[in-house]
Image: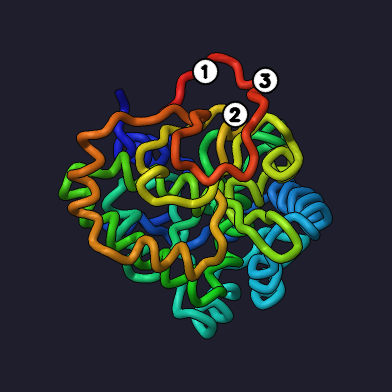
Amino acid sequence: MITLTEKLKEQFDAGLLSGETLGDDFTIAQPVHRYTDTDHAMWRTLYERQAAMLKGRVCNEFLEGLDTLGMDKHRVPDFGALNERLMRATGWQIVAVPGLVPDEVFFEHLANRRFPASWWMRKPEQLDYLQEPDCFHDVFGHVPLLINPVFADYMEAYGKGGLKAHGLGALDMLARLYWYTVEFGLIRTPEGLRIYGAGIVSSQGESIYSLDAASPNRIGFDVRRIMRTRYRIDTFQKTYFVIDSFEQLFEATGPDFTPLYDALRAQPTMGAGDIAEGDTVIHAGTREGWGDSDDI
């Protein structure tokens, strides 16, 4: 199996990133000169489509972050311009990377309030789906919430926790927490359930499915439960976990997870679509259209 480091080296050797310098932390200077008219058109299409449909679906904190950032609607944004506003708000910054980076590198960035974002844009034929996160997913999906002080603190704490989990052999459990919160989380608001996870925010189909479909479960947030729950990477989620506030998320993940990891290792993992005794069930899914794909 090819490693991530070998994959990045192949990209350099193939000339895909020739002229760029890959740092020890896997960052590069954002190669803005490489963006084509097609790249900018793809950004514009995705931005206009998501911005139009997210009103009434995404949490207010995301919309406030998008407004504060003043993100370019028509062109792939310059990370430097975004960083000026982001740094003033919460001390975070975006750093450009060629793609997915090793776990420990990713955690080190988060722990130091740096969000690693893929610089490249998806192709027109990948408009509705791609497996590896691109610039639109990383920047439009993730960065607006980093304007929110509580969520920004949560992401830093997650990075520090990730460095510790890496040494404890508990990355699988911590990865589930990231998946079901940062990527595919829902939040309860006075107006109803809203989206905050970047994997949903950056997807037209899942923005609708996560809130409107009868198929998936929607279950109240519980750290232990989430860390035992496998997930799907090849289709929409079978279960969404719902927080009451970002304060709840931050406070629940503040304690040292070391004893929790030890306790959870003695318990079986749960399928992505399971409902367990003790769950706070907001909606029990009909399971329609789930298929037989394996969970991770």
At numbered mark 2, what does the secondary structure look like: helix, strand or loop? loop
- Residue, x 57% and y 66% (percent of image)? 145
1 and 2 marks in contact (CB < 8 Å): yes
Question: Observer-nearest residue: 104 or 206?
Answer: 206
Q: Where does residue 100 sit, x and y in percent of width and height?
A: 42, 45
Q: Is residue 264 left or right of 55 when viewed as pictured?
A: left
Q: Residue at x 45, y 25 (%)?
A: 295
Residue 287 locus on image (x, y percent): 63, 24
Element carrying mark 1: loop
| Label 2 close to label 3 by CB (< 8 Å) | no
Q: Residue furthest right?
A: 52
In this view, the residue in front, 210 or 200, is 210
Where is residue 283? Give x, y as percent: 64, 40
Against 16, residue 116 (above or below) is: below
What is the number of the mark on residue 235? 2
Q: Is residue 204 above or below residue 243?
A: above
**Amino acid type, callout 2:** Thr
Spatial CA span between label 1 and label 2: 9 Å
Residue at which label 3 appears: 289
Q: Quadrant of the N terminus?
A: top left
Label 3 – label 1 distance at C-alpha = 11 Å
Mark 3 Cα-neighbour bin, 10 Å: few <14, some 14–19, many ≥20: few
- Can you identify the residue that label 1 sits on? 293
Q: Position of residue 258 (x, y in %)?
A: 19, 53
**Position above or below: 160 against 202:** below
Q: Residues within 10 Å of mark 2 (few under 14, many from 20)?
A: few
Image quadrant in which you'd find residue 27: bottom left
Question: Of helix, strand and loop, which one carries label 3?
Answer: loop
Q: Is residue 24 left or right of residue 113?
A: left
